Image: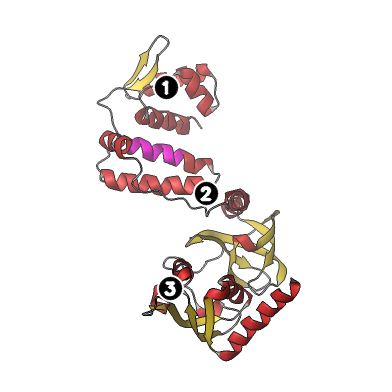
Amino acid sequence: MKIDRLLGIVVLLLGRKRWNATELAERFEVSIKTIYRDMETLGLAGIPVASHHGAAGGYEIMEQYTLNRQLASAKEWKALLAAVKGIASALNDQAYHELLTKVNALLPQAAHEEHGRQGEELVLDLQSWGSGLDLKPKLALLQQAITESRVIHLRYASSAGNESERAVEPAALIMKGSVWYVQAYCRGKQGFRMFRLTRILGLSLMLERFEPRQSPQLEGLIWRSDWAVDQETPMLLLFQPQVKHRVYDAFPSVFITELADGSLQVAGSFSLDEWFYGLLLSFCQHVRVLAPAYAAEEVKRRAQLIFEIY
């Protein structure tokens, strides 16, 4: 739409000193003549666009013309810019890239100069290491389904290792910690569920549309024990000092007690499922299950199975 293009041109000119007609035409996928007419329209609207001729020529907005940036401080604008950059890096959506350009244009000049001297103060990257190539197509397809209220057919592997096929009505994309989920109404289970994107083995967008349902509140979302397939069991674990960094990565700090010899004791309740036993085995000889005894025996049994393979 013309009005969107005109606003986009103003934002670009605010964010950078000078753009020539060819650059603007390529950016907005229109002809150079259309850009000339747009500039005339902006001038008639009272926006002071100056035209410069020659090899270094182009269009720019006069220095005294700025949008009101006093709604937030420079630090607040930079924090907002970091957040938008993070979203734009994760989602292949042109709307977020355009929003990034707009927010960048609203950042006061003093903040731009400070950024040039000091670099980024805050960086938000919503992709875990090495996951971008796999997750971005899923995120893009799910975002399209949410926007267009389209049913999704997915093949999903649960934490218990069971595979199922489901028809779902996606409601929201959620990042919790460093993990992406999609909140969706599952037609088979007749209720809202959280699906981890890395466990979605197959994903297809259906032609069928749905009427969005009232989804559960997401703000302040915390883990509920009834989501677990297995009942949680109180456990006592002992880790060697060599894996201290991994212990703090894997368990809440309130569960961890550092002992005098440098070892770490972890006391908490966990679901004794495939995922948890796999986590314990990943610590190899640096962990010992102190209680309950049957959990220690299960780790021993699984370790023996691994030994027999080799």
Q: Name which residue type carries label 2.
A: Ala
Q: Looking at this view, name the residue that lies furthest to the bottom.
A: 293
The amino acid sitting under disc 1 is Trp
Q: Residues within 10 Å of mark 1 (few under 14, many from 20)?
A: some
Q: Which residues are magenta?
A: 98-107
CB within 8 Å, label 2 to label 1 = no
The residue singled out by tag 1 in the image is 19
Q: Mark 1 or mark 3, which is nearer the start of the sequence?
A: 1
The residue sitting at 40% across, 30% down in the picture is 12
Task: Give the crowd class for mark 3: few <14, some 14-19, many >=20 residues within 10 Å.
Answer: few
Which marked residue is nearer to the observer: mark 3 or mark 1? 3
- Front residue of this view, candidates 218 and 107: 107
- In the rendered structure, which amino acid carries the disc numbered 3? Pro
Q: How many marks?
A: 3
Q: Horizontally, is 204 left or right of 2 in the view?
A: right
SS under mark 3: loop
Per the image, the residue denoted by label 2 is: 90
Q: Secondary structure at mark 2?
A: helix
Residue 120 in view: yes
Distance between the alpha carbons at the discs numbered 3 and 1? 52 Å
Q: CA distance from mark 3 to mark 2?
A: 27 Å
